[in-house]
């Protein structure tokens, strides 16, 4: 019997999600912000069971390809594959400097 893998959303990703939510709430509407928030978690739920089908994050290359990303509109959702869990590390707007993604490797 295979061990069940769980998805864990790291605090850093939740902070970024909250910042985006606040921006959309102020600049657009509460409904738009709520839709964005809910859609984020629906995308996260779709990682399992085919997490290996997502592409390796080209800004965080490793030998064993543990860093993967989901392209979601203007965002990258970066996650790390572990033995017993998948950690969602960050929500990254693609208009930012990709060098900022290097800091994702330090997220604990």
Image (cartoon, helix red, strand yellow):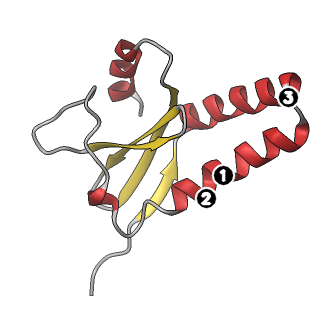
Label 3 with label 1: CB-CB less than 8 Å = no
- Residue name at image x 85 percent, y 30 percent: 25
9 up-or-down from 23: above or below: below
CB atoms at circles 1 and 2 under 8 Å apart?
yes
Task: Rate crowding at label 2 as few (under 14), some (14 to 19) or many (20 or more) other CA atoms within 10 Å.
Answer: few
Q: Which residue is mark 1?
A: 39
Question: Which residue has dot 3 on it?
Answer: 28
Image quadrant in which the N terminus is located: bottom left
Tell me which numbered mark, 2 or 3, is placed earlier along the sequence: 3
- Residues under labels 3 and 1: Cα distance? 16 Å
Q: What element does badge 3 sit on?
A: loop
Look at discs 3 and 1 and give the one toward the viewer: 3
Say which residue label 2 marks.
42
**Badge 1 element:** helix
Q: Measure the alpha-carbon separation of dots 2 and 3.
A: 21 Å
Badge 1: how crowded within 10 Å, few (<14), some, or many (20+)?
few
Q: Image point 50% across, 17% down: which residue?
A: 95
Dot 3, how many residues are within 10 Å of its Cα: few (below 14), some (14-19), or many (20+)? few
Tell me if residue 52 comes above or below residue 97 in the rendering: below
């Amino acid at each position: 019997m295979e061990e069940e893998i769980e998805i864990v959303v790291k605090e850093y990703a939740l902070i970024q999600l909250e910042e985006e939510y606040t921006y959309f709430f102020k600049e657009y509407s509460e409904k738009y912000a709520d839709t964005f928030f809910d859609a984020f978690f629906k995308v996260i739920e779709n990682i399992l069971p085919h997490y290996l089908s997502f592409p390796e994050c080209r800004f965080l290359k490793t030998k064993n390809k543990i860093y993967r990303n989901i392209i979601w509109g203007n965002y990258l959702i970066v996650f790390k594959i572990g033995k017993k869990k998948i950690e969602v590390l960050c929500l990254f707007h693609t208009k930012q400097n990709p060098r900022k993604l290097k800091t994702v490797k330090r997220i604990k």
